[in-house]
């Protein structure tokens, strides 16, 4: 038997942001290989499936990608419906292409089910568009993270050139990132927001300038965090600064 593997986006965290197709497939799946940060309420939708954690988190033990590929291939030979559940959208910083290529080489059918990526969840939560007429006509989605065997990437050039930049998996290196972006020509006064746990009730925002990014990131907890920077944030950052100033004076 050769089943079908679905690479499914779990979205940014909130269970009700899951797509209808994703929810249906979870209910049909015989086995689900899931990332570390998938909401338990989403996993609960896979009531008849075996759940296999294969998450990757910085600073912790991670499942090797080649092993994940083999598990998916083996599972497709036992189950009609196999779900590979990835945080956010599978096709953005999710190593989906490696899984697609391995499955295709093994003659196994693959389908990708999109999910809401963290950049869009952050924009929605903040109520600030990543693009805006007269201010931002382009957006760069970047990450400083590279694998041990991967060649260096000049991701920073895109973050400097873009009107709005969204940095994934960068909070742990925020101070170094800020200094490097400023050295490359991004203004130190560029408005910045850091969002932790996007779309969840416990989400937290931190606002400031690029020069303050390192200090802002120190206030981030253990949840996944995303960095947004650009002039589209200027009004929101100014408003937050005014609120904090008024609160300080009131005390």
Image (cartoon, rainbow, N blue to C red):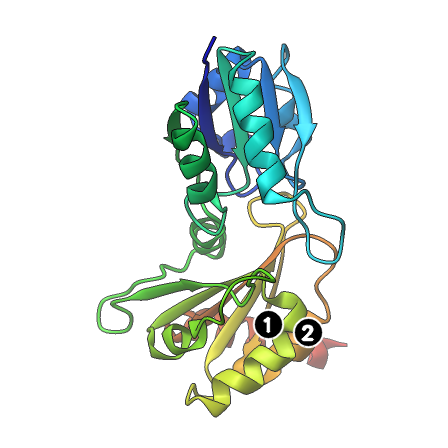
**Distance between the Cα atoms at labels 1 and 2?**
6 Å
Relative horizontal placement of residue 131, taking residue 51 as reference (left or right): left
Relative horizontal placement of residue 140, taking residue 147 as reference (left or right): left
Q: What residue is shown at x 64% (from left), y 13% (from top)? A: 47
Q: Where's the C terminus, which quadrant?
A: bottom right
For disc 2, the neighbor class at 10 Å (few under 14, some 14 to 19, many from 20) is few
Q: What residue is shown at x 61% (from left), y 62% (from top)? A: 148
Q: What residue is shown at x 47% (from left), y 37% (from top)? A: 99
- Mark 1 in CB contact with mark 2 (< 8 angstroms): yes
The secondary structure type at the circle numbered 1 is helix
- x, y percentage for residue 111? 37, 27
Residue annotated with mark 1: 243
Relative horizontal placement of residue 73, taking residue 172 as reference (left or right): left
Give 65 or 242, whichever is nearer the viewer: 65
Question: Compared with residue 175, is residue 60 higher up or lower down, i.e. above or below?
Answer: above
Residue annotated with mark 2: 247
The secondary structure type at the circle numbered 2 is helix
């Amino acid at each position: 038997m050769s089943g079908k593997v679905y690479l499914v986006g779990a979205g940014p965290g909130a269970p009700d942001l899951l797509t209808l197709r994703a929810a249906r497939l979870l209910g049909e799946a015989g086995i689900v290989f899931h990332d570390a940060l998938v909401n338990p309420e989403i996993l609960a939708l896979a009531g008849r499936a075996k759940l296999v954690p294969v998450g990757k988190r910085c600073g912790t033990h991670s499942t090797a990608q080649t092993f994940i590929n083999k598990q998916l291939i083996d599972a497709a030979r036992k189950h009609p419906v196999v779900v590979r559940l990835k945080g956010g959208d599978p096709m953005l910083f999710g190593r989906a292409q490696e899984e697609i290529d391995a499955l295709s080489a093994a003659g196994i059918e693959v389908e990708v089910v999109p999910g809401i990526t963290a950049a869009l969840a952050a924009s929605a939560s903040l109520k600030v568009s990543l693009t805006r007429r007269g201010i931002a006509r382009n957006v760069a989605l970047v990450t400083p993270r590279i694998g041990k065997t991967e060649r260096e990437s000049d991701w920073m050039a895109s973050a400097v050139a873009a009107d709005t930049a969204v940095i994934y998996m960068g909070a742990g290196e925020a101070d170094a990132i800020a200094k490097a972006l400023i050295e490359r020509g991004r203004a130190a006064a560029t408005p910045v927001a850091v969002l932790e746990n996007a779309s969840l009730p416990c989400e937290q925002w931190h606002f400031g300038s690029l020069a303050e990014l390192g200090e802002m990131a120190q206030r981030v907890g253990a949840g996944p965090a995303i960095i947004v920077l650009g002039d589209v944030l200027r009004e929101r950052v100014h408003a937050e600064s005014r609120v904090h100033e008024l609160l300080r004076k009131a005390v």
